[in-house]
Image (tube, rainbow, N blue to C red):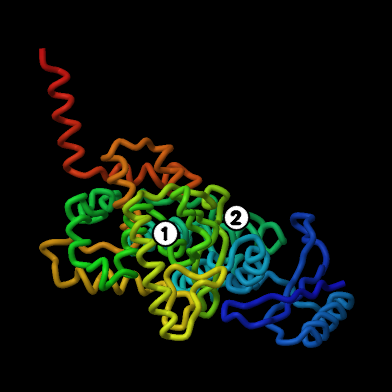
Amino acid sequence: MASIKKYTDKHGETRYSFQLYVGTNPQTGKPKKTSRRGFKTRKEATLAASRLELEASTGSLQQDNNILFETVYHEWYEVYANTVQESTTVRVTGMFDSHILPAFGNKRIRTITLSALQSAVNDWSKEVKRNYKRWYYYTRQVFQYALKVGYIDNNPATLVTVPKPDISWQRDKNKFWTKAQMVHFFSYIDPVESAEKYTLFRVLAYTGIRRGECLALTWQDINFRQATMTISKTVTQGHGGKQIIQPPKTSAGKRTIPIDEVTLGHLKHWRHAQQRLYLMMGYNTMAPGQLIFANRVNGYKSLNTPGKWLHTIIDDKPDEFPQITIHKFRHTFTSLMFESGATIKEVQGLLGDADATTVMNVYAHVSKKQQKQASDNFARFMQI
């Protein structure tokens, strides 16, 4: 009997699907299943499933030897989407829509050869610096699903040789700012006239939290007495471009971190300024759950706002500031923490990264100043 399931498609709309057992693969002995999806109502899905059950029982059901890669992808995605957060499904569907499906979507999955897969991965590696590994990984997952349900007899994707990534990005001198550049940046923001903007950048620069984590902060997350900040949620993008609130992806992401006294002072100043400003607009910011950085209607700011603020300041000053993104504030924080003498474990705890590899990648970007200092220290050590 078919199993009818409700799911949400990539556009955020409710749809129904079903999976049906149709016999045994004579070559592998594994159960064979077929599935259909995209039905607008449960009734439509039930009727379609009944027709297929009848065809299967009479032997007139067309076999799935010709099933397309795109069809298998949709089946796999329905299972996968239940194992990750919504923001992850948005990124993954984007990878498939933009890169993987154009390469394989209209091909019968049984006919896709190792040669075709290798060629696609090679092309992807020339197209982008690193993301091609993710595209290959998810392509392989679809093939693995097809093998599991009996659509194919082996998984050629496991035999692909993944090209070595171009590591030149690690030597990019503009991956983060120096201490002098960061200090100079704040000279362009008036901490009184532009208190919110100054405080937002101060929090990003001096705590290393992510943009989404910063925009999700409420005043309840700040303990002024103990000078700490609790990170327990993040603003991210869901289906249809809608902003949603999610918990951190890992347990390490939920953390309480210290705040320096100067940053704490700017937060206090902005809190009082926010109360006056928003009261004039008709909002009581003393209510529980009040956002620290809210939009004009006291809701969540757009994820694009911090970046727009940043580029308004630096875009016309190329000689003063290397072009960086908001996320590179996090890289800058990491680099400067290492320069100040922090350990990898200390930085890892502040950033909320469960995997030390992320921190080590930034550690490898150490500034020229730190490299020169290390070299000078070694030379002095070796002097007799």
Q: CA distance from mark 2 to mark 1?
A: 38 Å
Q: Which numbered disc, 2 or 1, marks the residue closer to the eye?
A: 1
Q: Residues within 10 Å of mark 2 (few under 14, many from 20)?
A: many
The residue identified by callout 1 is: 210
Rendered residue at 33%/53% (across/down): 206
Q: Residue at x 85, y 77 (%)?
A: 53
> Circle 1 sits in a helix, a strand or a loop, which is it?
loop
Residue that appears at 52% across and 78% down: 242
Which of 289/250 is in front? 289
Q: Quadrant of residue 176?
A: bottom left
Q: Which tag, 2 or 1, sits closer to the chain's start?
A: 2
For residue 80, which quarter of the picture? bottom right
Which amino acid type corresponds to the residue marked 1 in the rendered image?
Arg
In front: 82, or 162? 82
Q: Quadrant of the C terminus?
A: top left
Determine whether label 2 and label 1 are within 8 Å by CB.
no
Question: Circle 2 — which element?
Answer: loop
Q: Residue furthest top?
A: 384
Residue at image coords 51%, 71% = 286
Residue 29: give x, y in percent of width and height. Answer: 79, 55
Quadrant in which the N terminus appears: bottom right
Coordinates of residue 210 in the picture (x, y in percent):
42, 59
Residue 124: percent from left, percent from top: 38, 62
Residue 155 is labelled as: 2
Neighbour class for label 1 at 10 Å: few (<14), some, many (≥20)?
many
**Seen in the image, is 172 located left or right of residue 301?**
left
Q: Nearer the viewer, residue 122 or 236?
A: 236
Residue 346 visible within the image? yes
Q: Is residue 63 left or right of residue 243?
A: right
